[in-house]
């Protein structure tokens, strides 16, 4: 089980956290991971970055997640972590 927390604090909100949340929801559904991934929002994770949104997957913090970088992030840190790489 992966716990994926998306920062929805003011800085990340301005950098597109709502869009990233929507992409995560869609990707989890498409890959049928509803029983393997818990999506949650979090106010400031404390790792702000100039570009993109901060996401915490279990204990690992990932910064700079943008729409353009989302697919690689999802593959590398969600699918591979669940051993469901395609």
Image: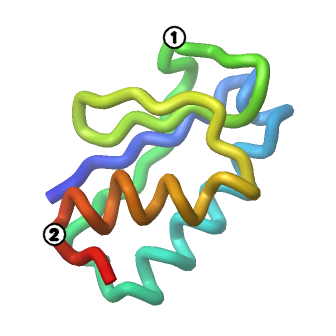
Q: Is residue 10 left or right of 30 when viewed as pictured?
A: right
Give the residue at mark 2.
83
For the residue pair 10 and 47, the one nearer the viewer reads as 47
Could you tell me which secondary element the residue under label 1 belongs to?
A: loop
Image color mode: rainbow
Q: Residues within 10 Å of mark 1 (few under 14, many from 20)?
A: few
Q: Residue at x 35, y 52 (%)?
A: 77
Q: Which picture quadrant has residue 1?
A: bottom left
Q: Percent position (x, y) of residue 40?
A: 43, 48
Q: Name the residue carrying label 1.
A: 46
Is the residue 22 above or below the residue 34 in the image?
above
- Number of other residues with Cα within 10 Å of mark 2, as a class: few under 14, some 14 to 19, many 20 or more: few
Residue drawn where x is 31% and y is 68% of the image: 79
On the image, the x and y values in percent for residue 49 come to: 68, 18
Give residue 58's quadrant in the image: top left
In the depicted view, which residue is nearer to us: 86 or 47?
86
Q: Secondary structure at mark 2?
A: loop
Residue 85 shown left or right of residue 15 in the figure = left
């Amino acid at each position: 089980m992966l716990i994926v927390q998306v920062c929805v604090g003011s800085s990340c909100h301005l950098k597109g956290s709502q869009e990233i949340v929507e992409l995560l929801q869609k990707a989890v559904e498409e890959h049928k991971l509803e029983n393997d991934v818990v999506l949650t929002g979090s106010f400031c994770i404390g790792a702000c970055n100039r570009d993109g949104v901060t996401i915490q997957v279990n204990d690992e913090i990932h910064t700079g997640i943008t729409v353009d970088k989302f697919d690689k992030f999802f593959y590398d840190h969600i699918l591979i972590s669940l051993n469901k790489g395609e």
